[in-house]
Amino acid sequence: MTAQSGLFILKTVTYHSIKQVFDVSELDSVQSIIGITFKDVTCLEQSLMHRSYLNESSSVLASNERLEFLGDALLGLVVAEELYYRFPELPEGDLTKLRASLVRTETLARVAGSLDLGDSLYLGKGEDESGGRHRQRNLAGTLEAVIGAVFLDQGFEVARDFILRILRSEMEQIATGEIDDDPKSHLQQLIQGKQQLTPVYRVVDIEGPEHGKVFTVEVSAGETLLGQGNGRGKRIAEREAAKNALENIEKGDELD
């Protein structure tokens, strides 16, 4: 079997593993927002199909996870190539860190949110009611699945241009040195994007002698406790609290 025929089979399986379940207007809205007009919209449908929906619809045979796998691989390649040529002076280690900051779940979820993909995601009732439309891993996975769908439907060049377009803002931040590994900044961007709130840090305990105090800090958004951290110093404890909050959100302990 040739590579070309293999791709045809993959497309056939992807396109016809579901019957149309979306309103045409919904798909038109998604295409308008992402700036891509699909030749076969069933590929776009597939990319928006969360696995939780499979148990509630006999017409759905597969989730978006295969497209997510494909999109993840393509995303890594395109980002690596762009960084390689954009920063010719950087060593491999620094390029790896930059790539990680661009393809991590938090970044992809933020981009997916800006494209309103959560609103278009097909979810099971339980997943939807538990906040699945705002869950980071769902948003990030859906964005990767959409990238995979664009690649299958439109080809590599269109998919590459799409990736670079939706990541333009993050790329520009990297170019100006604005992206770092500060978990407090990451948490603030995430909470402000989702809830229009600013995380608040509060010292809840101080232990130890004067020369070696250990601070315990909690971080909250509104009435919701996000995380807790300890450290020899208030700033260190706040950083640990932010890291704990990001870990909790990543695990699915979503905000209400």
Image (tube, grey):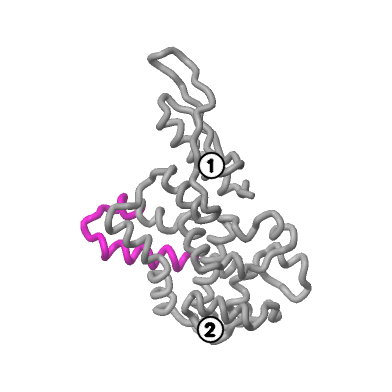
Label whose residue precedes the other's in the sequence (2 or 1): 2
Look at mark 1 in the image and give the residue it sits on: 245
What residue is drawn where x is 45% and y is 51%? 189
Residue at x-position 47% and y-position 63% = 111
Q: Label 2's element? A: loop
- Amino acid type of the residue that numbered disc 1 sits on in the rendered structure: Ala
Name the residue furthest left. 89
How far across and how far down the image is residue 23, in percent? 67, 80
Mark 2: amino acid: Phe
Cα gap from disc 2 to disc 1, whole angstroms: 38 Å
Residue under pointer 2: 38
Frontmost residue, 26 versus 64: 26
Highlighted magenta segment, given as a residue range: 72-96
Q: Is residue 10 visible?
A: no
Assess whether residue 57 is covered by the magenta stretch. no
Disc nearest the viewer among 2 and 1: 1
Above or below — where is 91 with respect to 19?
above
Residue in the picture at 50% in, 39% down: 200
Q: Nearer the viewer, residue 43 or 199?
A: 199
Q: Is residue 47 above or below residue 111?
A: below
Residue 182 on image: x %, y %: 39, 43
> Which residue shows up at 47% across the image and 15% down it?
208
How dense is the environment of label 1, judged by Cα within 10 Å: few (below 14), some, or many (20 and up)? many
